[in-house]
Amino acid sequence: MRDLLIAFSLLATATPVSAALGGDVASVEADRVHIQGALTNIVRTDRYTLHEMRSSTGTTIREYVSPDGKVFAVSWKGPFLPDLRQVLGDYFAEYQTEARRVREGRRARGPLAIDTGDLTVVVSGHTRAFTGRAIANRLMPAGFDKNTIQ
């Protein structure tokens, strides 16, 4: 019983490690485990490394990592939205605040686009077909073209 209580208290106080936006490359594996998916591709270039994973629900998530080891962009495409709290990491609160502000000021449906200067997020789609991308602009490598993020 005592061991069970210790294990429960450790689980309750543990903080998840993730390679979310702004996170460290060393924790990409934590995201793969969180989405219960598989790492399907790694592409290395001079400007970035792309880690692509597919969740158990069929959504593809791509994490773009700068040469200094920081996740500067994340994109997704699939039948379900990923856990945006996980994907956006420390940027989630900023996203939530801005999304609420943008939604209050519009009546039409369509993509949700946020650009705070430091954070750019575009979320679009409908049931069974979602896409999106999030970019931490200050972490983006010099000369990187945002439009290459898919």
Image (cartoon, rainbow, N blue to C red):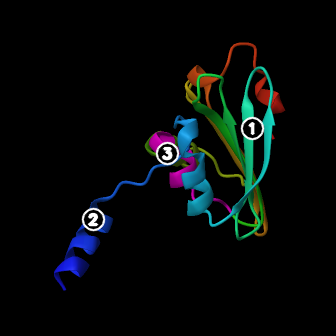
Secondary structure of the residue carrying tag 2 is: helix
User: Which residue, given by chain and number where applicable, does mark 3 sit on?
Assistant: 89
* The stretch drawn in magenta includes residue 132: no
First-in-chain label (3 vs 2): 2
Badge 1 amino acid: Leu
Badge 2 amino acid: Leu
Give the camera-side residue of 97 and 62.
Answer: 62
Report the magenta residues as a range: 81-91
Give the camera-side residue of 34 and 144.
Answer: 34
Q: Is residue 12 left or right of residue 66?
A: left
Q: Residue furthest front?
A: 3
Name the residue located 19 percent from the left edge and 86 percent from the top edge: 1
User: Which residue, given by chain and number where applicable, does mark 1 sit on?
Assistant: 50
Badge 3 amino acid: Gly
Query: Residue 129: x percent and y percent?
Result: 80, 63
Name the residue located 53 percent from the left edge and 36 percent from the top edge: 24
Q: Residue furthest left?
A: 2
Query: Residue 46: x percent and y percent?
Result: 78, 20
Whether label 1 touches label 2, CB < 8 Å: no
| Numbered mark located on residue 10 in the image | 2
